[in-house]
Image (cartoon, coloured by chain):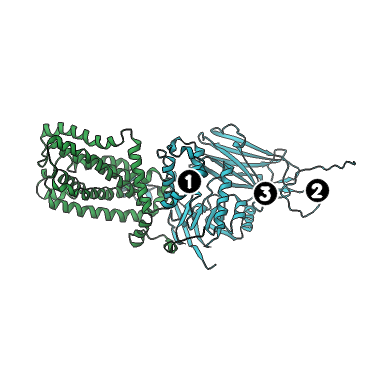
Amino acid sequence: MGDVVVQADGVAKRYRIGEDYQTYRTLRDAVGGLFSRRDARPRRAEIWALDDVSFEVSRGEVLGIVGPNGSGKTTLLKLVSRITAPTRGVVRTRGRAGAILEIGTGFHPELTGAENILLNAAVLGMPRREARRKFGDIVDFAGVGPFIETPLKRYSSGMRMRLAFAIASQVEPPILAVDEVLAVGDAEFQRRCLDKMSELGGAGRTVLFVSHDHGAITRLCTRAIWLDRGHIRAEGNPAEVVRDYLHSIASKGGAVELDIDPGSPAGVRSVALVSANGDPSTTFGRDQPLELRLDLEAFRFVPGLDVAVQIFASDGIRVIHEAWLDESRPPLPEGKTLLTFRMPALLAPGRYVVGVRVGDAAGNHQAREALSFEVLPLPADPVDGRLRITQPPVSWSATPL
Amino acid sequence: MAATAAPDHEEWIENGPSGGRLGRAWLTELWEYRELGAFFAWRELKLRYKQSVLGIAWVLLQPLLGMILFSALFARAVDVPSDGARYPLFAYVGLAVWAALTAGVSRAGEILTEDPNLVTKVYFPRVLAPAGTVLASGLDILIALLLVGPLMAIYGVTPPVELLLLPLCVVGLLLVAFAIGIWMSALQVLYRDIRYAMTFGLQAWLFASPVLYPSSLISGDLRLLYFVNPAAGIVESFRACVLGTPLYGPGIAISAASLVTLALTGLAYFKRVERSFADRI
């Protein structure tokens, strides 16, 4: 690995978090602080988002980063792209590292689509000449041609997203750090996003890629890192790292409480997997239906609020991905809602992980690998060693002709 | 398709806990990102002249209405001197400079906090946002001064030769707006309630600057002290340039020194704290 282009050396990042997660101070605090004794001020909690993390990335590698929420994945991308500075340690990059942590940064509603393309491209570090050259592609890709001279405030949120994504997908710094930008929602976007990732990987770009789509990590990445509470827990072959990570997700008797990030307008409080008789369970015969109960809480009405359930096989392949809004179901209301997800007997024997996502058009509010469960073979099943993902109850019949 | 990384992209860029000093590496980086600075200026212009119904008229109307108001009030009731110029012209130039200056300072102050994602989701040398925003004030003052022509014609005044130095005055104005704007920008990220103090501060600053009265009202050493306020130097320079009023040399020197000090300390402070912006905004 001679040609190292990213080097993290004992990197640690501490965040101070006040009671209400307010991280800026007010002048009043500062002036007040002059007159009060130090320990009279409210103690601020400290969180080490990353602690003593070291790794290297070589030119042309696509490094996948997996781990539960709050494990420091996004912080790592912010350090590589210099958005924030480490508390200890050093990150070095050979050449500029661009980050796509959200799409549409710097968009202004009063400016036209065309103006916003140039502006957003500049904010993402694309030289103006390049932006002008790619302008046509961006407009075509976003499909906003007729509205390009219309102020952005007249765009639908879908159009705005498509435009933002089209720009982001054209940014090609030597080193690219991408956070899982699009999650719940448009499948077409997700496909394009992944296409773009594999294209970049193929073109010899160096990419750092954070995702909960474990299948994509396995497919696209040349190497993966598993972050757990700010530490690197495993590193190496993506398929193995993903498998180990998914294996680590405890079943906890079929029910699990989830945390909702402060500031999120909505999230799932708890997830329970229940068997046909209504009891939480983590083992199912392959002929048994599955039922998943999600306690959703929306602190206010969120337009376009969507909840998705994903089931991953132990190698990271996504077997199931279903969202509430898929079949134009009614909007999810404010307050607490019990969502019940039912699925017929389908899966082949093996271990699976349930992922839950909550989001809206703006992006994810919550993405968790919630719990794992085991599908057991039927007593009559022969040990055949065949590789398969699904094994629903089937029937055979033989009719003499 | 082949990666055509320029040699300068191949240098190691370091992100460590220390750093944040003014230096050559920083200047090189600013140069690399210069287009983004221009974009901030361009966006500011677009928004300033697009968002308000009155558009350009607003830039003219603000000092014009002020001029009418203060001429009627001050010049008649209190008989404020105006260094030999007609008071309405005197007030118009002062108010035009003042409007451009304060627009620059307050927009530079709020540019980072009004869209925190610029700080938390992307990287660029942060100073470019307030710096670019301030540039838009250059156009403000040029447009506002266009009205001085007709006004001078009305009052039968001919422009002095010093008018040729106008570009220098505009650069000076931008520097003053930048020096103070950059302080406001950094302070507003770190102390969110400074906004409220700023509203009051700008008002107080108006009365401490020779906008509606000449600095010649102040006598002796006090007048030197008065020019520590760089706005004093720039307002009187504009007037000398456009109306040919006498310029107080020692005062201008003090204003210039004060401006350089404010700009350099502001840059150093901004640079030192900008690395924590993303965590604190």
Chain in green, by letter, is B
Vertical side of A278 occupied by B177: above or below? below
Q: Position of residue B86 (x, y in %)?
A: 12, 37
Residue drawn at the location 69% of the way across and 44% of the way down = A281
Give the CA separation, mark 3 to mark 2: 20 Å
Residue A136, numbered label: 1
Task: Assign the N terminus of chain A to one quadrant of the image.
Answer: bottom right
Q: Is residue B17 left or right of residue B240?
A: right
Please indicate whether residue B117 sits to the left or right of residue A234 in the image: left
Answer yes or no: is residue A211 visible: no
Q: Which residue is mark 2?
A: A379
Asked whether the residues under marks 3 and 2 belong to the same chain, the reply is: yes
**Amino acid type at image mark 1:** Gly
Q: Is residue A355 visible?
A: yes
Determine whether the residue tagged by mark 1 lies in a helix, strand or loop: helix
Mark 2 vs 1, N-terminal side: 1
Is the C-beta separation of discs 2 and 1 under 8 Å? no
Above or below for A212 versus A108: below
What chain does mark 1 sit on?
A
**Residue at disc 3, secondary structure:** strand
Reading the chain from its start, which is encountered first: label 3 or label 2? 3
Mark 2 crowd level (few <14, some 14–19, many ≥20, 10 Å Cα) = few
